[in-house]
Amino acid sequence: MQQERGKRERILEAAQTVFARKGYYQAKIEEIAELAGVGKGTVYEYFVSKEELYKEMFKVILNRYTEYVMVEETPEMTAKEWIRHLLEMHLRYMLENRQHMPTNFGDLGGMDMEILGWMYDMRKRSIERLISVFQKGIDRGELKGMDPELGANLLVGMMRGVTLPLMVEGACGEPSQVAEAMTEILFDGIAR
């Protein structure tokens, strides 16, 4: 069973590399199989199609990201500390995994309604968690009265805004320092 599980994981890892380099449409199952060290037929034993492999690979990536950046709240942790830590973990994950970023941003093949719906549900859960953090910060007087959902969406937008240049250009600075600067901008604003 362990060897079987190992093959599946190797195929998924190889798929990340090949899809990132070539995009969905240009990627070939043969290349993925070769990189994984298995035959093409073995890939089809685990995944009935290229589309299914792509979907499963994407789910693995998003689940891994979610586990990596998950910040457990502690009673003494302020909303600002929680958000700063979340930003740092996000930046670290993106830097460590930038080799899996697609080089062709317009090639979103394999994204059918099922996976788009799944991605939306994941995003919704993340936003709900952030809303909770913002609401606790408001309730404790750490944050001013505001719409916590809007605050959560602004934070997600801020995270996405730094991700693309980071993934394409690579260097963003030390993640803890960048996270600190982002947190200061978020909490102190940009006005004098």
Image (cartoon, rainbow, N blue to C red):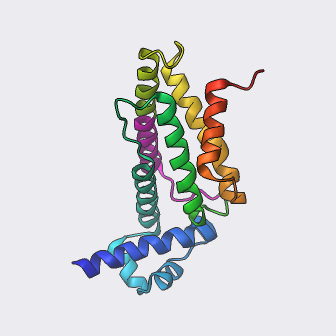
Q: Position of residue 95 (x, y in %)?
A: 59, 58
Residue at the spot 51% in from the left edge and 17% down from the top edge: 147
Give the overall secondary structure of the magenta segment.
helix
Q: Which residue appears farthest toward the top when viewing the image?
A: 145
Q: Quadrant of residue 160?
A: top right
Task: Quadrant for the C terminus, please.
Answer: top right
Q: Position of residue 186 (x, y in %)?
A: 63, 29
Residue at the spot 60% in from the left edge and 43% down from the top edge: 179
> Seen in the image, is 128 located left or right of residue 99?
left
> Seen in the image, is 65 located left or right of residue 96?
left
Task: Quadrant for the N terminus, please.
Answer: bottom left
Q: Quadrant of residue 150?
A: top right
Q: Say above or below: 104 vs 139.
A: below
Q: Quadrant of residue 21?
A: bottom right
Of 101 and 90, the residue lying toward us = 90
Q: Say above or below: 29 vs 52.
A: below
Q: Which residue appears farthest toward the front when viewing the image?
A: 76
Q: Which residues are magenta?
A: 107-126
Observer able to see residue 147: yes
Of 98 and 51, the residue lying toward us = 98
Q: Say above or below: 24 vs 126.
A: below
Q: Which residue appears farthest toward the left when viewing the image?
A: 1
Residue at the spot 33% in from the left edge and 73% down from the top edge: 46
Q: Number of numbered discs present?
A: 0
Q: Position of residue 92 (x, y in %)?
A: 55, 54
Observer able to see residue 105: no
Tell me, yes or no, whether the highlighted magenta stretch contains residue 122: yes
